[in-house]
């Protein structure tokens, strides 16, 4: 055990019963929370230090959601209470939580249409299970998908950063992004439903690394963003992640329609009710808005250089990396829009 893990074991684990002397090791490669595997004999747990953007209050959301899923027989990690019955350990400005460990494998890229179908099926079962949950969600981050606000921030960054080294390049892209936003159909005004909020593929645990286990989706993890959300944003973000067959910064992107079709059919077949026309329209245009929104956010940070991380071994500065990302998401947005007619047909619009 390295020194940092020793310190974690000494400071955090005494707050939990039965974990004296447990082994602690880094787990995964997440960019937000710090995650560790805790092992004692045959028992394993996941220990996380929450990023400051999250309040300790969100653990009440996670507890309510996972208990509901477990009551309905779905596989899910569960929060482990501390010795005094709390859902987290607060040490100064640090918030720690402990969850049960779900054995399985996660992927960064969709491996097959069968895996895409399983992902859609899992998300539908997750949505269906939480439709009637009785819980007041707290600690939610506001404005995450407030696209008009993101567009306004881009315009403000352009006005305030005229001397930035990348201003001219960002200005050319910003003009295209702002024009595209004015041309997109408005999303239907649907009530929010309880969603995961961050359906990138790596937040799905599958039974194994090869078929058929890799096409058996077990559960969703990283539930920090769970709460009410528009369906178009939820599935739009999923498809932005699952169907993009190009690297994030690639200036030529491909939106994989076979993955879209399979995941949509998995979701549709498992939801337990037909989606309304407005819900299907939200699904149609949600991925268009999400890909554009992310391009806007990257373009804004290409000038402000304050939010997104960057690969210093590949780019001379944060701005250059975020400009490449913005161009990549713009390329994806264009690829997505080029498939609108085909997607509409699959969605029954």
Image (cartoon, rainbow, N blue to C red):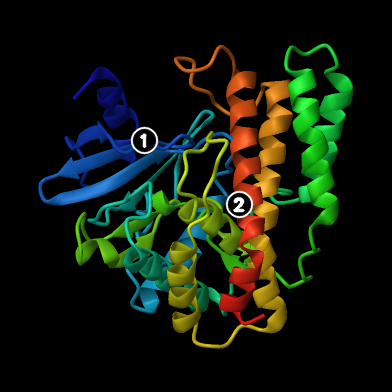
Regarding mark 2 in the picture, which secondary structure is present there?
helix
Would you name the residue on which mark 2 appears?
A: 335
Q: Position of residue 27 (x, y in %)?
A: 29, 37
Say which quadrant the C terminus sits in: bottom right
Q: Residue at x 27, y 31 (%)?
A: 9
Seen in the picture, residue 172 relative to 189 is either above or below; the reply is above
Residue 29: numbered disc: 1
| Residue drawn at x 36%, y 35% as measured from the top left | 29
Residue 130 located left or right of residue 290: left
Question: Local crowd at mark 1 within 10 Å, few (<14), some, or many (≥20)?
Answer: few
- Label 1: element kind: loop
In-image side of 200 versus 251 (left or right)? left
**Residue 121 x, y percent position in the rendering:** 41, 73
Q: Quadrant of residue 112?
A: bottom left
| Residue 68 visible here | no
Give the x, y percent position of residue 186. Answer: 81, 63
């Amino acid at each position: 055990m390295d020194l940092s893990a020793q310190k974690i074991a000494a400071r955090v684990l005494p707050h939990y019963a039965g974990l004296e002397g447990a082994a602690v090791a880094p787990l995964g490669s997440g960019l937000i929370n710090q995650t560790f595997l805790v092992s004692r004999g045959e028992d394993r747990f996941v220990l996380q230090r929450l990023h400051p953007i999250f309040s300790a209050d969100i653990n009440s959301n996670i507890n309510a959601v996972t208990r509901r899923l477990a009551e309905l027989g779905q596989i899910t990690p569960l929060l482990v209470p501390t010795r005094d019955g709390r859902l987290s350990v607060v040490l100064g400005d640090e918030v720690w939580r402990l969850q049960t460990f779900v054995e399985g494998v996660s992927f960064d890229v969709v491996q097959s249409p069968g895996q895409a179908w399983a992902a859609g099926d899992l998300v539908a079962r997750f949505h269906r299970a939480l439709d009637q949950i009785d819980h007041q969600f707290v600690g939610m981050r506001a404005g995450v998908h407030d696209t008009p606000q993101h567009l306004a921030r881009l315009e403000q960054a352009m006005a305030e950063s005229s001397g930035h080294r990348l201003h001219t390049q960002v200005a050319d892209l910003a003009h295209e992004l702002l024009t595209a936003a004015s041309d997109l159909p408005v999303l239907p005004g649907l009530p929010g439903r309880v969603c995961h909020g961050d359906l990138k593929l790596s937040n799905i645990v599958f039974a194994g690394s090869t078929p058929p286990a890799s096409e058996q989706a077990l559960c969703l993890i990283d539930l920090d963003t769970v709460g009410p959300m528009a369906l178009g944003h939820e599935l739009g973000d999923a498809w932005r992640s699952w169907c993009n067959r190009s690297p994030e910064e690639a200036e030529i992107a491909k939106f994989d329609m076979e993955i879209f079709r399979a995941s949509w059919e998995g979701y549709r077949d498992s939801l337990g009710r037909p989606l309304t026309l407005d819900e299907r329209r939200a699904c149609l245009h949600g991925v268009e808005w999400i890909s554009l929104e992310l391009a806007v956010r990257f373009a804004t940070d290409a000038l402000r250089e304050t939010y997104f991380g960057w690969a210093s071994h590949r780019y001379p500065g944060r701005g250059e990396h975020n400009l490449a990302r913005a161009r990549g998401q713009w390329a994806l947005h264009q690829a997505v829009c080029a498939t609108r007619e085909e997607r509409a047909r699959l969605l029954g619009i």
